Image (tube, rainbow, N blue to C red):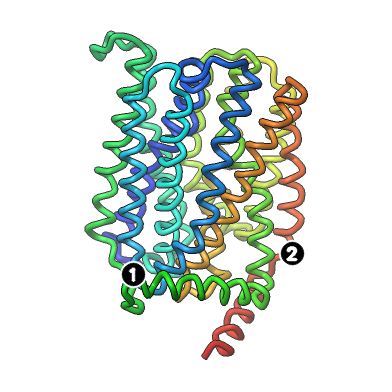
Amino acid sequence: MQDSKKEIIAWAFYDWANSAFATTVMAAFFPIFFSQYWSAGSSAETTFFLGLGNSIESLVVAALAPVLGAIADRGSYRKRLLIFFAFLGALMTATLSFISVGMWPVAMMVYIIANVGFAGANTLYDSLLPSVASEKRVDFVSSLGYGLGYIGGGLLFLLNVLMYISPSTFGLADGVVAVKVSYLMVGIWWAVFSIPLIIFVKEPQGERLSLSAAVRDGFSQIRRTLGALGRLRNTGLFLVAYWCYIDGVDTIIRMATDYGTAIGFSSESMIVALLITQFVAFPSAILYNMFGHKIGIRKALLVAVGGYSVIAVLGFFMTKEIHFYLLACCIGLFQGGIQALSRSYYSRLIPTEHSSEFYGFFNMLGKFAAIIGPLLIGVVSLITGEQRYGILSLIILFIVGGVLLAKVDEKDAGAEIEAYRSSAR
């Protein structure tokens, strides 16, 4: 039964759990620690290797996501697979604590596996949304998840920042030890706060196939889904639009601290900017849901895409740390909204009985986009020796994504889904 308060809160708390990885590790300490501790190359080389690592991880997840979704739908393995990937990510994150100075290939490999765990679990987590929330509540529940993620990830990040700035206060030798302890804390946090979802969120009912049969049937289902997307025009159009604009969003999230380092900002100022983003994004994710219901979800997404276009332009001209802080506020205003409403809006454009599989394609396209963005910035930075041009190039992705999104018609999508169901009977 949908809209159980216990299930909604337990589901949303997984965002609280895994956002610690997205904030402390992905956005903050790994890029900084990679360039200053594990890697000893020039700033342009570090940007290239960091972008390459993110792209490799994204390629693996992009290939894995639709397969995971199909298997989960055909065999009712969503929760079990989610638990496997979540704990894989948590374990690899904790492992970062034990990697010594200069060992950047090992650090990158462990980081890639942790990211695979993070993204693989998210594919299954997102697919549970339609079974937890009714269509009436799905935007709110999705926004609640992101809101809890920002506040939970932000609280642990705040503690980790205090440990990094003043390690002696916490009985730590120096900032390096503080960062390593932070990796361990994130792994534990991620695992512990996954428990409510494991206990209280029910596995959606479906066919009870063996795992091997589900794998075989899953691959067959992918081919059928690709054919279905040819008939679900609005669903396919939204996926391509999402592919474009989320590229820019994910790239800004992943590469912001490296970009700040390259143009001469201190580690402390970038960490403060990330904290600003987290705590602005928490209320904004909830308020943006209200804004979306007032003007329409698709229009609210278009506003957010436009906002990110402006952010990319402002990032090119950024020269002072106060600019970085102001830009962090702007990102916080739109980040939670564009992510939460994209996730919930997509649930209206797909047949719910195949939600895992369709969310697999949703996450796959997001990951294919993240292959292009970080690598684009890395290559442009390496060629020109200037990271600003890479940031500015992201505006193309926002413009193309916005134009395609404007063409999506939710009412037509409903009719297409019904026609698809009828033909499949």
Q: Is residue 165 above or below residue 180?
A: above
Residue 278 visible, this angle: no
Mark 1 residue type: Leu
Res 199 seen here: yes
Relative to the observer, which residue lies in front, 404 or 363? 363
**Residue 62, position as x, y percentages in the image:** 55, 53
User: x, y percentage for residue 40?
Assistant: 53, 15
Instruction: Look at the image and tell me in which quarter the N terminus lies.
Output: bottom left
The residue located at (35%, 79%) in the rendering is 207
Circle on res. 211: 1
Query: Residue shown at 35%/56% (left/top)?
Result: 82
Tags 2 and 1 touching, CB below 8 Å: no
Q: Residues within 10 Å of mark 2 (few under 14, many from 20)?
A: few
Q: In front here: 297 or 181? A: 181
Residue nearest the observer in this picture, 334 or 250: 250
Q: Quadrant of residue 203?
A: bottom left
Q: Identify the element where label 2 is drawn.
A: loop
Q: Quadrant of residue 83?
A: bottom left
